[in-house]
Amino acid sequence: MPLDQAESRLALVRRARRINRELAELYPDAHCELDFTTPFELLVATVLSAQTTDVRVNSVTPALFASYPDAPTLAVADPAHVEELIQPTGFFRAKTKSIIGLAQALTDRFGGEVPGKLADLVTLPGVGRKTANVVLGNAFDVPGITVDTHFNRLVRRWKWTDKTDADTIEADIAAIFPKRDWTMLSHRVIWHGRRRCHARKPACGACPLARLCPAYGEGPTDPVAAAKLVRDGPRG
């Protein structure tokens, strides 16, 4: 049922934290779905993930990292070869320029290593706060909130914020949850967005969060119809 439009700040915080607890039960294995073994690989993979799927990125990175396993090797790569390797991710010319540029910056300014500070990461070509928080949270265990398209959609549906700017959304959500929860919260919300709370037709009738959701009813509420919309994993 729709929630009270006059929800107090305290009630909002309690509801948001209840949703996070239920997401933790629903997705106990939630994690970053980009494949990586080093901070450098995660950084490059995250840049490549713009406007495509993690599944698509994971299909090209093994060959990319076999040829260019670190920043110094990618910094001197032939752009045409990199374009060929990452073409399936889309926008491959711009992405090639970004990842070669960030590899050059890492080599020239950080000794070829990925820095573990937000202020340093966002100075790299193609790296904004979203990408930086993915790397910090998953490669360095530094809490961060990842405001991707799924996260943006769900936190607005849940009325945790009414903002549209990613940086402001990040600040609003950070004010609701303790810092220790930020990284896992991001994973859980993103998993829910990929599996149930879709952009066009959320699986409302198959959602354990229905009673806590102000947007309940945007998708089918019939359990059978809604169950057909639930995905087991990320969309390829």
Image: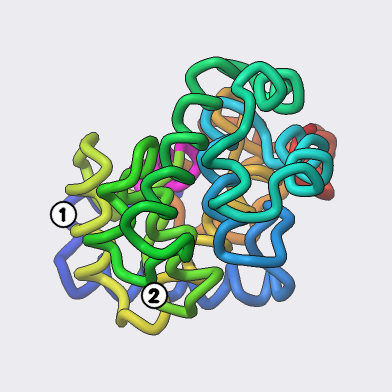
Q: Is residue 155 magenta?
A: yes
Residue ID for mark 2:
143
Q: Is residue 163 magenta?
A: no
Label 1 element class: loop
Depth check, front residue: 108 or 41: 108
Rendered location of residue 142, percent (x, y): 40, 77
Q: Which residues are magenta?
A: 149-158
- Camera-near label (2 vs 1) is 2
Residue kind at label 2, given as amino acid type: Pro
Main structural element of the magenta stretch: helix, strand or loop? helix
Rendered location of residue 38, percent (x, y): 64, 66
Label 2 element class: loop
> Hey, which quadrant is residue 176 in on the image?
bottom left
Residue kind at label 1, given as amino acid type: Ala
Disc marking residue 6:
1
Rendered view: 45 above or below 32: above
Depth check, front residue: 172 or 70: 70
Q: Is residue 58 left or right of residue 129?
A: right
Marks 2 and 1, how far apart at CA? 31 Å
The residue at the point 20 percent across, 40 percent down is: 163
Callout 2–callout 1 Cβ contact below 8 Å: no
The residue at the point 39 percent across, 36 percent down is: 126
The residue at the point 52 percent across, 56 percent down is: 189
Rendered location of residue 75, percent (x, y): 52, 41
